[in-house]
Amino acid sequence: MSNYDPLDQAGQDKARSDSRTRDKLVESTDIGDVQWLMSNKRGRRIVWHMLDRANLFASSFNTNSMTMARDEGAKTEARRWQIMALCNCADLYTLMLKETGK
C-alpha cells in the first residue's frame, strides 16, 4: 500500500522539489564527467569511437524495421553524448574532430 495522499499539496510540492534537486545533481555530474573525458586525448578518442560505432554520421536505413529501430536507438544515445560535448566543451569537441581527421 502506498503512502501517497492526493490531498497533501505540501507533500507533493516537496516531492517535486526533491526530484528537481536530484535531477540537477545528476545533470551536473554528467556534465562534469563529459568535460573530464573530453579533456584528455584518450577520452576524446573513446567518445569518437562511440559516436562512429553508432553510425551517427551515416544513414540507418535498413529494409528490416527491427534492425533499423535498433540502429536508431544507438544513434539516439550517441546524439546525447554529442550534444553534451558540444554544449559543455565545444572547443574540445572541435579538437576531437581535428584529431580524427574529420
Image: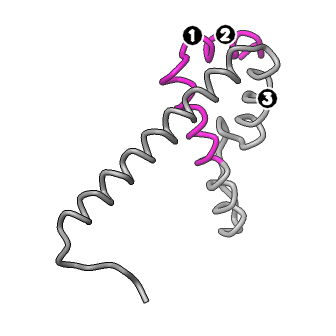
In the picture of the structure, the residue carrying the numbered disc 2 is 95
Q: Quadrant of residue 98?
A: top right
In the rendered image, the vertical position of residue 7 relative to residue 27, given as above or below: below
Q: Observer-nearest residue: 31 or 83?
A: 31
Q: Which residues are magenta?
A: 75-102
Instruction: Kindly identify the residue that appears in the image at 42 percent across and 40 percent down.
Output: 24
User: Within 10 Å of the Cα at label 3, are there few (<14), some (14-19), or many (20+) other Cα atoms?
Assistant: few
Q: Regarding mark 2 in the picture, which secondary structure is present there?
A: helix
The answer to whether 87 is drawn above or below residue 17 in the figure is above
Which label number is shown at residue 46?
A: 3
Where is residue 7 shown, x and y percent of the image?
17, 77
Q: Are discs 2 and 1 less than 8 Å apart at CB?
A: yes
What amino acid is labelled 1 in the image? Asp
For the residue carrying disc 1, how many other residues have a C-alpha within 10 Å: few (<14), some (14-19), or many (20+)? few
Seen at 71% across and 41% down, the residue is: 55
**Image position of 85 with respect to 79: above or below:** above
Separation of residues labelled 2 and 1 (CA atoms):
6 Å
